[in-house]
Image (cartoon, rainbow, N blue to C red):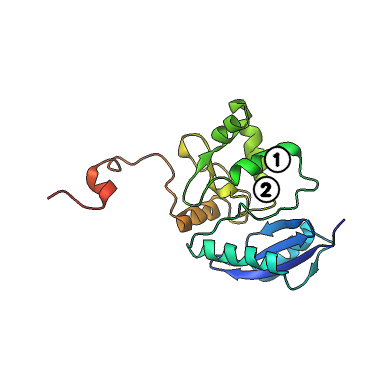
Amino acid sequence: MSELGFALFDTTIGRCGIAWSGRGVAGVQLPEKSERSTRSRVLRRFPAARESVPPPPIQRVIDGIGALLRGETSEFGHVSIDVEGVPDFHRRVFDVARGIRPGATSTYGEIAERLGDRHLAREVAQALGQNPFPIIVPCHRVLAAGGKMGGFSAPGGVRTKLRLLSIEGAQYGEPMLFDRLPWAVSGRRPA
């Protein structure tokens, strides 16, 4: 097994954590109520990890997460993740979810359909609920049927999911009554 390292880092939503191995990012931790709680959560998930300075590829991921959480464009499709011990079905779900761009959303059913069986929506939701790579595998961009929020297992629950989607400028939920009017689309009212 590769040696594990971890670091905590500041973002606009709080102090996050990241763990890595020689194979890539082993996990991302969204902020807990305090830095101490975030560090404890990382160490519970990765008891063999040692706090250290991130190597350059991991620092680039940290910088990208920080940028995304400031509302800047940042993509993580190129980031290597350490999926050792992750079930095959979850890996497949994560691969599909990684294709959802910032500002866009998908549903559990749509991901299940892309995997070949729309009836696997519940299993997709369960896999994303166990996602050890939030932000890199953007589970916050996956909604329940009809644009409903569904769950979110990160600290803060659905409130955190809404915050992340808002930062990214995502449109979610069912359209509002006036969303389809010309001035709602163009930003101008007719004269």
141 above or below 76? above
Residue drawn at point x = 61 percent, y = 51 percent: 77
Residue in the foreground of this view, choosing between 17 and 31: 17
Rendering quarter of residue 180: top left
Q: Are the residues tagged 2 and 1 within 8 Å (C-beta)?
A: yes
Give the percent coordinates (x, y) of residue 43: 78, 62
Tell me the SS state at disc 2.
loop
Amino acid type at circle 2 is Asn
Tell me the SS state at disc 1.
helix
Most extreme residue toward the bottom, as rendered?
A: 53
Crowding at mark 1 (Cα within 10 Å: few <14, some 14-19, many 20+): some
Give the percent coordinates (x, y) of residue 179: 30, 43
**Residue 37 shows in the view:** no
Q: Which residue is mark 1?
A: 90
Amino acid type at circle 1 is His
Report whether 191 appears left or right of 81: left
Crowding at mark 2 (Cα within 10 Å: few <14, some 14-19, many 20+): many
Q: Which residue is mark 2?
A: 131
Residue drawn at point x = 52 percent, y = 56 percent: 164
Separation of disc 2 and disc 1 at Cα? 8 Å
**Residue 2 shows in the view:** yes
Give the percent coordinates (x, y) of residue 188: 21, 52
Q: Of callouts 2 and 1, which one flags the residue occurring earlier in the amino acid sequence?
A: 1
Residue drawn at point x = 58 percent, y = 32 percent: 114
Most extreme residue toward the right, as rendered?
A: 1
